[in-house]
Image: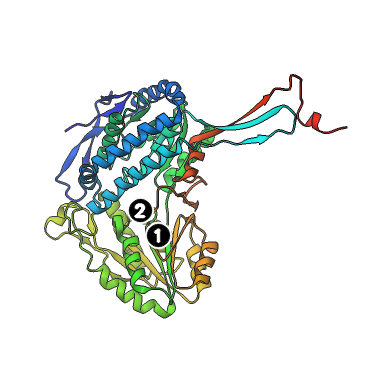
Amino acid sequence: MRFLNYIAGQWVPPHHDRWFANINPADTRDEIGQFPLSDAADLERAVRAAADAFGQWSRIPAPQRGELIRRAGDIFHRRKEELAAIMTREMGKPLFETRGDIQEAIDTAYYSATETRRLFGHTTPSELPNKMNLSFRMPIGVCGIITAWNFPIAVPSWKIFPALAAGNTIVWKPSDDAPHSANIFAEILQEAGIPSGVFNVVHGNAEAGSALVEHPSVRLIAFTGSTATGKQIAQRCGALNKKVSLEMGGKNAVIIMDDANLELALDGVLWGAFGTTGQRCTATSRLILHAPIHDRFLEMLTERASKLRIGPGLDPATQMGPVINQRQLEKILGYIAIGTAEGARLITGGNRLTRGELEHGFFLEPTIFADVTPTMRIWREEIFGPVLSVTRADSFEHAIALANDSDYGLSSAIYTGSVEYAFAAMRDIEAGITYINAPTIGAEAHMPFGGIKNTGNGHREGGWTVFDIFTEWKTVYVDFSGRLQRAQIDTQSA
C-alpha cells in the first residue's frame, strides 16, 4: 500500500515518484507500506501552502483556534486504541507504552487549547504622561518541524499544538522510521477542522529535512533528534538567521543512596533503563549506587532484568519490544563490544535474541555493565538502547560529581529517604529535569521539558514555556498626549 504526503489539505504523491518502505521492527517480513521519498520540490509546495494560509490562520481569534485543537484532542481520544496498534506495529514499543504516547498528545492538545485564552502580554506604566506601554505575543510564521521516531505522536504534539495555538502554520517532516503515525495525525487535524494549508506533512529522509531547514520562507525550525544532527541544523539556522529549537540527546543518571527504598528504586531503574527498549532521550543509561547497597542492589537488578519478557509489542505480555532497525541494532551491539573491550563487567544480557519468531525482528537482551568508570565510552556516549552502565559512589558528594560528569544534561533522578540529600540534589545536579524517588522518564504535558549542555539550546517544550519558542514579542507604545515626547530626552533635565 502507498501512503501520500499531506499538502494544502490534499493527499498527494511525491512529484518524482520515489518511495521508501516502512517495516515492522518486530517482524521484518511485515511491510506496513510505501511512503513518499520527497525532495525540495515537494517541500516547496508544502511551504508555499503554509505561507499562503498563515495570514488567515493567524488572524483567527486564538480561543477559536483553541477550540479546533481541543476537537483534535477529542478525536485522538476516540481513536486511541487504533492509533496505539499502528504505532506499535511501526516502531515496536508495547501497546501499554503507545497508549501512553497518545495520551500525552491528548493532554497536550487540551492544555494548548486552554492556553489560547492565556497568551498574556504585559501592560506597564510609561515613564511619560499620557502614554501607554503594552506588549503582545505574535506568531512567527511558517514553522518547520522535524521529529524522531521513538515518540511518533507525543513529541510532535509538543510542538504542533502550541505552534498552531500561537497562530503559526506548519510543515512537518516526520521520521522515516515512523511515517504512518504522522499520516494519522494529519487525518485527525483535518477532521478537527484545521484549514487547508495550515498543517502539512512531507515524508522523506535527510534530503527533505535539509530542504525544510534551508527554505527561506520557513521562519523557525523545531527539531527533536540526535545531538550531531541538531548541531548541524543549528549551524545552518545561525547562518540563515533563523530561529531554532533543539531537543537532542541525553545520558541520564540515577543515584541510589543507602537510605533509599530499594524495591521502589528497582522498579524505577527497570522502567527508566528498559522502557521503550532504552530508546528515549530521557532513558536511564547511568546508574550510580552508594557503596553500602551496591552489591545488594546490583544482584536485585540483574535478577529482575534477566526475567523481562521480550517480544513483539502487539503481544499483551511483552514488557520490552525491539530496537527500531538493523542500523541501530548494530550500533548497540557495537557499544556492548566496546564496553567489554574497555574492561567493564558484563553481568547480564549483551546478545541479540533470535529464538523462534524473534529471529525476524531486531530484539536485544536487556544489558547491564558493572564496574564502569567515567572514562569509558559506554559511560559518556549516548547508546539509545537497552544498555545500563553501573558504577559505585563512596558518598553523596561523589555521586553528584559522577552524575554531573557528562556532556549531556537532560534528566536525572535520586532515590533517598533524606530531605537533605533530596534538596541538595535538586540544587546541585546539572540537568533540566530532576526526579526525587522516581525514574528519569515520565514528563507531564503542563511542565517545561528540556535540558542543558549538549541536550539542547536553551528552549523548553511543554507547559507555558513552549510559547517562548513559537511566538515573538511585539512592544507597542500608544502616545495620546498630542505632542512630541522624546522618551529619555524629555524625562531627564539637562
Circles 2 and 1: CB distance less than 8 Å?
Answer: no
Query: For mark 1, does the 10 Å Cα neighbourhood hold few (<14), some (14 to 19), or many (20 or more) residues?
Result: many
- Among all residues in the image, which is located at the extreme right? 494
Q: Nearer the viewer, residue 72 or 232?
A: 72
CA gap, disc 2 to disc 1? 10 Å
The residue pinned by badge 2 equals 280
Residue at x 31%, y 43% (from the top left corner)? 152
Q: Quadrant of the N terminus?
A: top left
* 489 on left or right of 167: right
Judge whether 343 appears above or below 68 on screen.
below
Q: Nearer the viewer, residue 418 or 66?
A: 66
Query: For mark 2, does the 10 Å Cα neighbourhood hold few (<14), some (14 to 19), or many (20 or more) residues?
Result: many
First-in-chain label (2 vs 1): 2
The image quarter containing residue 171 is top left
Name the amino acid, label 2: Arg
The image quarter containing residue 285 is bottom left
Name the amino acid, label 1: Thr
Q: Which mark is residue 440?
A: 1
The image quarter containing residue 350 is bottom left
